[in-house]
Image (cartoon, rainbow, N blue to C red):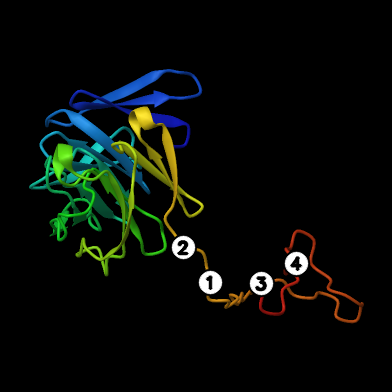
Amino acid sequence: RDGFAYVATSGDVTVVDLLTGAVGETTDLGGGLVVDLALDGEVLYALDAGGTVRALDLAESGLSLLGSVTFAVSSGRLFVADGIAYVGADTGFLGGFSTASFADPSAPVLLSGPDDTSVGGELVRLNGSGLAIAIGTPGGAFGTRVLDVLRPVGPDRTDGFVTRVTLPTVPVDLALAGGFALVAGGSGGLQVVNYLGFDTQGQAPTVAVSTPSVDVDPATPGLQVQEGGVPPPPLDSPV
């Protein structure tokens, strides 16, 4: 973020300048081993081995602790979006995930435990369009290696199963981009999963565009825009 990396070292977080390579301040979080980090806005979140998520303020000089909350079950993987923390709830047999609200980072609140323990519980990420994508091996060593798609009705619900894709190897990490899930599968390499079905409804979207630009010389043919202004794009019908 802004040219800096945040590195977990034991129970600390260290700031590293990526341009110079200089190692900056190290902050002792006062807890157990830090196993995952996540950024959301001006806040850095650190999950430790005991299931505690700590919020650290990045806006001030250095890192300062804002608040923390402890999850009853944790896989050691964390995702945060829009002030909501999502923690995998894999126990080695059961799956699912839990949530907590950091709307006020100084007073976080647990929202939900794993409402559906049959879905992947290693790691969950949101696609930004209402879907949660979870990976894991529910059922343990003899379970199914899966990528599950859910549509939770809100951050206080962690169910809403939609569909499942079986993976060839145990999934260990996940990234989402362009409607695809990129799943790191250890010896199985990188799996690219199209978790969204093709659009077969035949209904074109409608785009509405507004612009603050004004024709500064209506008497002259065409659109005259003030120097430095932005002309509107030529969109005047559904596309």
Provide the secondary structure element on which disc 3 rests.
Answer: loop
- Residue in the picture at 23% in, 45% down: 144
Does residue 158 lie above or below 203 as drawn?
above
Measured in 3D between alpha carbons, the distance from the residue under mark 3 to the one under mark 4, in whole angstroms, is: 8 Å
Count residues near mark 2 (Cα–Cα under 10 Å), then give few for <14, some for 14-19, many for 20+: few
Answer yes or no: do the residues labelled 2 and 1 have beta carbons within 8 Å?
yes
In the drawing, does residue 224 fall left or right of residue 175?
right
Q: Please name the amino acid that badge 2 sits on.
A: Gly
* Res. 24 image quadrant: top left
Residue 29, position in %: x, y?
A: 17, 31
Answer yes or no: do the residues labelled 3 and 4 have beta carbons within 8 Å?
yes
Residue 188, position in %: x, y?
A: 38, 32
Q: Please name the amino acid that badge 4 sits on.
A: Pro
Q: Which mark is residue 231?
A: 4
Q: Which mark is residue 197?
A: 2
Answer yes or no: do the residues labelled 4 and 1 have beta carbons within 8 Å?
no
Q: Please name the amino acid that badge 3 sits on.
A: Thr
Provide the secondary structure element on which disc 4 rests.
Answer: loop
Provide the secondary structure element on which disc 1 rests.
Answer: loop
Residue that carries the numbered disc 3 in the rendered image: 211
Circle 4 or circle 1, nearest the eye: 1
Measured in 3D between alpha carbons, the distance from the residue under mark 4 to the one under mark 1, in whole angstroms, is: 35 Å
Residue that carries the numbered disc 1 in the rendered image: 200
Measured in 3D between alpha carbons, the distance from the residue under mark 2 to the one under mark 4, in whole angstroms, is: 36 Å
Does residue 45 lie above or below 33 as drawn?
below
* Res. 187 image quadrant: top left
Q: Please name the amino acid that badge 1 sits on.
A: Thr
Measured in 3D between alpha carbons, the distance from the residue under mark 1 to the one under mark 3, in whole angstroms, is: 32 Å
Measured in 3D between alpha carbons, the distance from the residue under mark 2 to the one under mark 1, in whole angstroms, is: 9 Å
Count residues near mark 4 (Cα–Cα under 10 Å), then give few for <14, some for 14-19, many for 20+: some
Give the mark nearest the N terminus, 1 or 3. Answer: 1
* Res. 23 image quadrant: top left
